[in-house]
Amino acid sequence: EKSSKEEVLSVRRILEFWKDHEVDLVLSQIENFLETYQDSDFKEGLLIIKGHALFEKQEYKESLNTYQKISSEENQEKVQANILQILFLLERYQDVVNITTKLLEDESQDTFILYIHAQSMFRIVTNLQGNQEKSFMEIIGYFEKLIKFENYRSKVLLNLAESYKAVEN
């Protein structure tokens, strides 16, 4: 369906506010827009921006709810890293592991997926009681892969050391 002139102007205005980091204005404008133009072709793009804006404001649950309203697979992929980050920040480590386990089957996944998977596994295992050696060995494998990437090296060194220590005890 063809977008109206008013619709296009509204989106343009929202994008200008977004560019100027007027987060609260962006959020209110998107709300108004989505109420007025419920079936707009711009809806998914605005949901992405709304999710990012809420993420920026550290309103993680609202951001996650917004991202989950995105229906197209292509747009879901665009926000996937943010969704994983939010789940991690909300300490929903098992949800992160469930999602990243499937993603890691694809060898071409970026390093961030491996990183957040390993960090979530580490948090789950350190909270477990009993024999954790097998789990720590798996985590050590992930951290050893990550250590090869300069931008992740400092982030995983301490966890790698703690994992080795846990296995030795």
Image (spheres, helix red, strand yellow):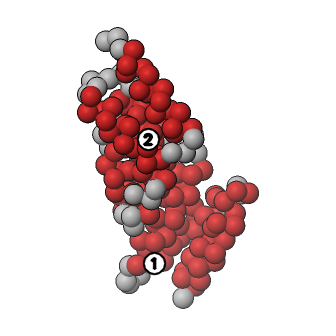
Residue flagged by tag 2: what amino acid is it? Answer: Val
Q: Is residue 100 visible to us here? A: no
Residue occupying the point 54% across, 54% down: 114
In what element is the residue under mark 2?
A: helix
In what element is the residue under mark 1?
A: helix
Tell me residue 38's x, y (percent). 26, 28
Tell me residue 52's x, y (percent). 46, 46
Depicted 47 relative to depicted 160: above or below: above
Query: Label 1 crowding class (10 Å Cα cut-off): few <14, some 14-19, many 20+?
Result: some
- Along the viewing direction, whichever of 40 and 134 lies nearer the viewer: 40
Sequence-first tag of 2 and 1: 2
Q: In the figure, is residue 129 to the left or right of 37?
A: right
Query: Label 2 crowding class (10 Å Cα cut-off): few <14, some 14-19, many 20+?
Result: many
Q: Residue furthest top?
A: 2
Q: Which image quadrant is residue 8 in?
A: top left
Q: Is residue 56 visible to us here? A: yes
- Along the viewing direction, whichever of 166 and 22 lies nearer the viewer: 22
- Along the viewing direction, whichever of 57 and 76 lies nearer the viewer: 57
- Which of the labelled discs sits on residue 126, or is there none? 1
Q: Which of the image's four quarters has the C terminus? A: bottom right
The residue identified by callout 2 is 26
- Which of the labelled discs sits on residue 23, or is there none? none
Tell me residue 137's x, y (percent). 53, 70
- Marks 2/1: CA distance? 40 Å
Tell me residue 3's x, y (percent). 36, 15
